[in-house]
Image (cartoon, rainbow, N blue to C red):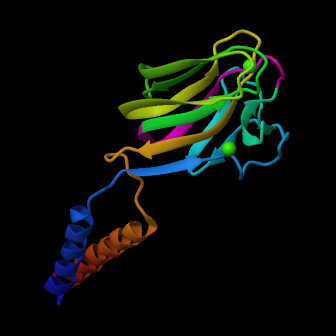
């Protein structure tokens, strides 16, 4: 009997281990963020936490029909930092402004030791409503920062798309349940073994 239970547990563990951990790509468009215009110390969605790098609050904001994230303080928007639970291997953003000034935009990726892994940048001309896509890739991205390196000028980030790394894949609920079943099976088998000896 004991062998049957532990055998089943081993089978379940084998099934879990055999399943490929595929990279998962998802987009946050900030439509779930409170507001627009509600300042927050931090905003978290799908395991990604957005904060302002200078301690400012962040908020959702509508610009040229786009709903995105922006620093709360007008005309001096700090860059925004996004910490990604479980890490990522690719991140891209859609970022821009509503005409007026020229904006030097950037997206930078860092590992958990604050080492710069990759960076992308662009220049949005004055009087342009165009939003640009920036992207970074690295196997072990812990967080990204993005915004505008132009002094005293704001930009809005319309959306962010993240690909979670294969090695850092977050277990799906179904997989986690099977893992728990397997562990329970092991514990039952161990208890029966101790009773017999
Ligand atoms: Ca601007
Ligand atoms: Ca958006």
Residue 127's quadrant in the figure?
Answer: top right
Instruction: For residue 166, say whether it is visible.
Output: yes
Q: Is residue 83 magenta?
A: yes
Q: Quadrant of ligand 1?
A: top right
Residue 164 percent coordinates (x, y): 42, 45
Q: Farthest front residue?
A: 127
Q: Residue at x 23, y 70 (%)?
A: 15
Question: Horizontally, is 46 left or right of 197 in the view?
Answer: right
Question: In which quadrant of the rendered image does the N terminus lie?
Answer: bottom left
State left or right for residue 76 relative to residue 141.
right
The residue lying furthest to the top in this view is 151
Q: Is residue 135 magenta?
A: no
The image quadrant of residue 174 is: bottom left
Q: Position of residue 177 (x, y in %)?
A: 40, 72
How many labels, in total? 0
Check the image and report above or below for 60 versus 119.
below
Quick check: 2 above or below 35? below
Q: Which residues are magenta?
A: 73-89
Q: Position of residue 150 (x, y in %)?
A: 68, 11
In the rendered image, the quadrant that contains the C terminus is bottom left
In this orientation, does residue 196 appear? no
Q: Is residue 12 above or below residue 139?
A: below
**Residue in the picture at 39% in, 31% down:** 137
Of residue 126 and residue 13, the one placed in the foreground of this image is 126
Q: Quadrant of residue 73?
A: top right
Q: Position of residue 46 (x, y in %)?
A: 57, 51
Report whether 180 appears left or right of 194. right
């Amino acid at each position: 009997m004991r062998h049957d239970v532990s055998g089943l547990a081993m089978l379940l563990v084998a099934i879990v281990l055999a399943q490929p951990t595929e990279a998962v790509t998802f987009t946050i468009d900030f439509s779930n963020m409170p507001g627009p215009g509600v300042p927050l110390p931090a905003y978290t969605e799908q395991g990604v936490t957005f904060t302002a790098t200078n301690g400012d609050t962040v908020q959702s904001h509508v610009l040229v029909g786009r709903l995105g994230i922006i620093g709360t303080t007008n005309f001096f928007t700090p860059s925004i930092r996004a910490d990604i639970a479980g890490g990522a291997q690719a991140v891209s953003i859609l970022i821009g402004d509503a005409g007026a000034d020229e904006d030097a935009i950037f997206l930078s990726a860092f590992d958990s030791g604050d080492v710069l892994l990759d960076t992308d940048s662009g220049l949005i001309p004055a009087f342009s409503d165009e939003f640009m896509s920036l992207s970074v890739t690295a196997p072990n991205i812990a967080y990204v920062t993005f915004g505008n390196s132009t002094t005293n000028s704001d930009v809005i980030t319309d959306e962010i798309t993240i690909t979670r790394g294969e090695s850092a894949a977050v277990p799906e609920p179904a997989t986690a349940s099977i893992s728990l079943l397997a562990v329970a099976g092991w514990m039952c088998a161990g208890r029966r073994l101790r009773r017999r000896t």
